[in-house]
Amino acid sequence: MGYMKKEYKYRLALGVVLILAGILSAAFFEVNTSIPIFVITMGSVIFVITAFRLFKNGELPDSDERTKKLAAYGITYSWLLTLMLIAVLFWVEYFKLIELTTEGTLGVLLIFMSISANVFRWYFMRKSDVE
């Protein structure tokens, strides 16, 4: 990826920090559920808009067959990990280890899928191939 302007780095970092703050506040503090949802949504919007601007300005790799293939594999691996997380959450609920709410479970799955897809895509890009 090479050089990226500090402005973009700070905006991406701000988006990630807001997402993590929303997740942590929902997990560890008893606050109104709309507050963490709002913070996570704001962080996601900042992150996505900044990423689109990076694509628009040509600071990220162009879309070609190789990058599409790597992105597809990243999403596939993300789905597999998410299925395993769903199984773990099922057993956690079954054995009553943690009381799960619908909003909390869906939030965890949404954030996990987004982050894991990007992590796998980044990993395969660094590796240059999936094989």
Image: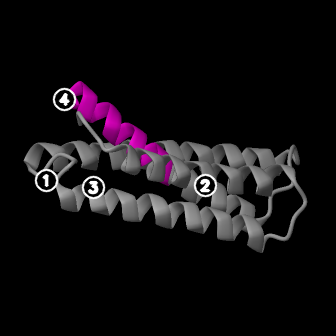
Q: Is residue 104 above or below residue 68?
A: below
Q: Nearer the viewer, mark 4 or mark 2?
A: 2
- Residue with the most extreme front position: 6
Report how far apart the C-alphas of labels 4 and 2 lie in the structure: 29 Å
In the rendered image of this protein, does residue 121 appear above or below residue 102? Answer: above
Q: Quadrant of the C terminus?
A: top left
Quarter holding residue 54:
bottom left
- Disc 4 target residue: 128
- In the picture of the structure, the residue carrying the numbered disc 2 is 19
Precedes in sequence: disc 1 or disc 4: 1
Instruction: Calculate the distance from the C-alpha at mark 2 to the C-alpha at mark 3.
Output: 20 Å
How far apart are the two marked residues, 1 and 4, measured between alpha carbons? Answer: 14 Å
Magenta region, residue range? 114-131
Q: Earlier in the sequence, mark 1 or mark 2?
A: 2
In this rendering, the label closer to the viewer, 1 or 2:
2
Labels 4 and 3: the sequence-earlier one:
3
Q: Assess whether residue 127 is covered by the magenta stretch.
A: yes
> If you read the primary sequence from the N terminus, does the residue marked by circle 2 or circle 3 appear first?
2
Residue labelled with disc 3:
54
Q: CA distance from mark 3 to mark 1?
A: 13 Å
The amino acid beneath tag 2 is Ile
Q: Earlier in the sequence, mark 4 or mark 2?
A: 2
> Which of the two labelled residues, at mark 3 and mark 1, occupies the earlier sequence position?
3
